[in-house]
Amino acid sequence: MIRQLVWSYVLLVAVAIAAFTVPVAFTLNQQLYGDAENTARREADTAALLLASGDTRSLSALADAYERQTLGKIDVLGPEPANKVWDSEGLKLTVQAKKPDGTVVGAIRLSYPDDPIVQRLWQIWGFRAALAVGVLIVAAFLGVWLARRVTRPLRELNAMAARLRDGDLTARAEETGPPETRTLARTLNTATETIDTLVGSQRAFIGDASHQLRTPLTALRLSLDNVADGVDDPHVREDVEMATAEVVRMSRLVNGLLALARAEADVAHPEPVQVLDVVAERFTAWRAAADERSISLVSEGFDIRVLATPGHLEQVLDNVLSNALEVSPDGGRILVRTTRPGLLEVIDSGPGLGDADRARAFDRFWRGQGLTGKGGSGLGLAIVKQLVTDDGGTVSLAAAPGGGLCVRIRLSPASPTSGGSR
């Protein structure tokens, strides 16, 4: 929009300059050629009077002076009719020399080249062209300043909209500028406050509901375990085990909702975190589950430092490693790699995901084959995305070389330090 406003302003100035200059150009051309013709006619009339009076000496002096001063030429001819011609060589003016009684005794032909006129025109229009270019340059700079001043409220509204797009419901626009812009900013601020209130109420409800459901679900699972211990009928035991599995799945779902609600409501500030230290810590926590299925946990790369809210990176790795362990085959490998400042990759050896499934993987409650196990809730990657986004980072999925899935987590790097590979 700024560029369009600047071009419009410069075009308007250019049209104004052209509208003023073109008429002046024709007037100036006519004036210069008219002045040259009048001067030439005076000289020719003077020479004709000298020829008619017989003063050849004065006529010769006049012709010599005229030739030196104007590069023109005065020739004495026989009786010829008066004439005036402008051609490619300039002006040719013929004036009859008459005695007082009207007898024509000869004629004077005065030749005046138009080179001095053309040169003068080039000087004048060269100066005018340079002045016009200077005016257009000044107009462009002035147009940029005016356009930026006029569009500043719109840029602020756009910045606010970008923050809203990224999930920052605290974004507000300054109510400045023209009345229309102030009204729009006020409307957006009111709408954002309403959305913030509704989302806050929704998060509070999810958190409260999840928290309240945890206790009865735990009690229900304990009751089912007690029932299973006292039942000898295999069919009844099978039904109890199925019910227990559903209770476990529901507990995971409730825990995931509670974790997601807490992640969305978290307002802590990111701090520098040593990535491979956190990776080693989470490997220790998941080592037993990995060893049970002979899955190797490997980390490599430089020990980078990133900015993350305390506890966020641990939760992110827990969710990603949990998914990776569930989809990796027995004897597989899970690799955690840091390839550049701020970039962390978790690569599993599972079946991977297609392009369409990778596009939906961060949706809540979505469970794709090769991403979550049978007991997954479909909230793991949604929690990961929320936590990473809150820390100003991004997370994406890609196909791993040789199969499997690569989860790429990009966070803002802290003060650059390097360590050895491990």
Image (cartoon, rainbow, N blue to C red):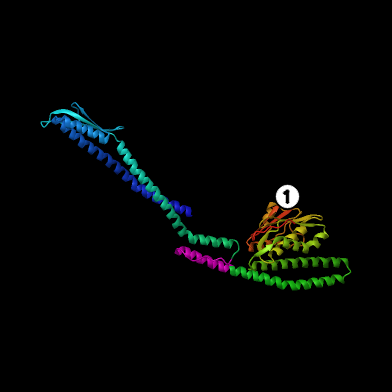
Element under disc 1: loop
Residue placed under numbered mark 1 in the picture: 401
Farthest residue toward the right? 232
Residue 169 vertical placement versus 118 (above, below): below
- Residue 100, magenta (yes or no): no
- Segment colored magenta: 169-195
Residue 406 vs residue 275, the one in the foreground: 275
Q: Residue at x 59, y 64 (%)?
A: 168
Which image quarter: residue 249?
A: bottom right
Q: Amino acid at mark 1?
A: Pro
Residue 301 vertical placement versus 38 (above, below): below
Which x, y percent locates residue 76? Answer: 20, 28
Residue 289 vertical placement versus 214 (above, below): above
Tell whether 221 sits left or right of 160.
right
Residue 29 vertical placement versus 141 (above, below): above
Which x, y percent locates residue 231? Answer: 87, 70
